[in-house]
Image: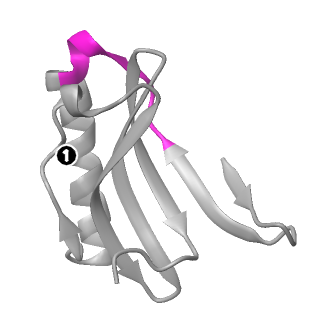
Amino acid sequence: HFGWDDDNKLERIDLKSASFPESDYSKSLTHTYESATRLMTRLYGPPSLENSIPPSSQLKDPGVVVSHVWQLEEGSLLLGVVKNKGTYHILIRFSQKRVGQ
């Protein structure tokens, strides 16, 4: 997904995993989350914000909980978990906005 500002300039790119039902949260989704976290850390170094995967009960529907933020040369990279219509997926967002500073 691409996000555009009012001047039609690209401001973010969202990547998301396949959706997982609640029954797969603690196993399959957690494995995908940990793999994504390791890959982003290998590519971009240690995150400036780092938390554990949020418990499924912490997510509203619809909602997102960001657990990791990396500061990039121009913007930020966010990693978190989204709940939408009773299913969950991993979100990786590249944003031109600086987050958490």
Q: Which residue is mark 1?
A: 34
Instruction: Work out whether residue 38 or residue 25 is closer to the camera in this orientation and state it.
Output: 25
Spot the residue most to the bottom. Answer: 73
Look at 17% across and 43% down and name the residue there. 53
- Name the one closer to the observer, 98 or 18: 98
Residue at left 77%, top 66%? 5
Image quadrant assignment for residue 46: bottom left
- Residue 70, image x and y in percent? 33, 73
Q: Which secondary structure, mark 1?
A: helix
Reply above or below: 55 against 3: above
Q: Residue at x 34, y 84 (%)?
A: 101
Q: Quadrant of residue 31?
A: top left
Please check the rendered image and state whether residue 23 is part of the magenta-colored stretch, yes or no. yes
Left or right: residue 10 versus residue 95 is right
Give the answer, above or below, for where 75 lies relative to 64: below
Q: Amino acid at mark 1?
A: Glu
Q: In the image, is residue 68 part of the stretch drawn in magenta?
A: no
Q: Position of residue 95 (x, y in %)?
A: 54, 69
Which of the colour schemes (rainbow, by chain, secondary structure, one colour) is used? one colour
73 left or right of 24 in image: right
- 77 on left or right of 44: right
Taking the spot 83% from the left edge, 67% from the top edge, the residue there is: 6
Return the x and y of residue 75 as percentages of the image width and height.
50, 80
- Count of numbered labels shown in the rendering: 1
Residue placed farthest to the right in the image?
7
Q: Which span of residues is magenta-colored?
A: 16-25
